[in-house]
Amino acid sequence: MPPPEAHVTLHLPILRQGGDPALTQEVMALQFMLLFRGGRYSPFERALRPSDGVDGIFGPNTKQWVKEFQGNSNLEADGIVGEDTWTALLYDWVRFQTAG
């Protein structure tokens, strides 16, 4: 018998510097994933601090982290988090979380 399938629908907003300030929680999730996957934060070493950059504001540092991720993922490094960037980041995140 094949394993059960799960179908998930996500609303992935386009995030960019100077974008919608109401998307604070989405930007914070993005920042956390980028910091963690980029090796800038380890929950095994210490607790996350506001100075790490998870502030919900898509500023120049977040844009740079997005561009670095995009470049490492063979995406256009434009600093805008659209469908392709979200897809690559979430795929990478899920793959990392289920490894082991």
Image (spheres, rainbow, N blue to C red):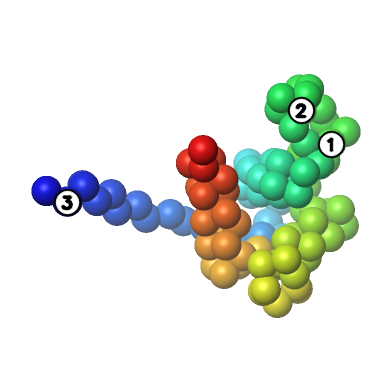
Precedes in sequence: disc 3 or disc 2: 3
Residue 10 is situated, as x and y percent measured from the top left of the image, at 43, 54
Q: Nearer the viewer, residue 54 or 18?
A: 54
Q: Which residue is mark 1?
A: 52
Q: Nearer the viewer, residue 79 or 72?
A: 72
**Pointer 1 or 3: first along the chain:** 3
Packing grade of label 2 (10 A; few <14, some 14-19, many >=20) is few
Q: CA distance from mark 1 to mark 2?
A: 7 Å
User: Which residue type carries mark 1?
Assistant: Asp
Q: Does 87 sit left or right of 33 as displayed?
A: left
Residue 2: mark: 3
For the residue labelled by badge 3, is the local secondary structure a helix, a strand or a loop?
loop
Q: Which residue sits at x=79%, y=62%?
A: 68
Q: CA distance from mark 3 to mark 2?
A: 40 Å
Separation of residues labelled 1 and 3 (CA atoms): 43 Å
Q: Which residue has dot 2 on it?
A: 48
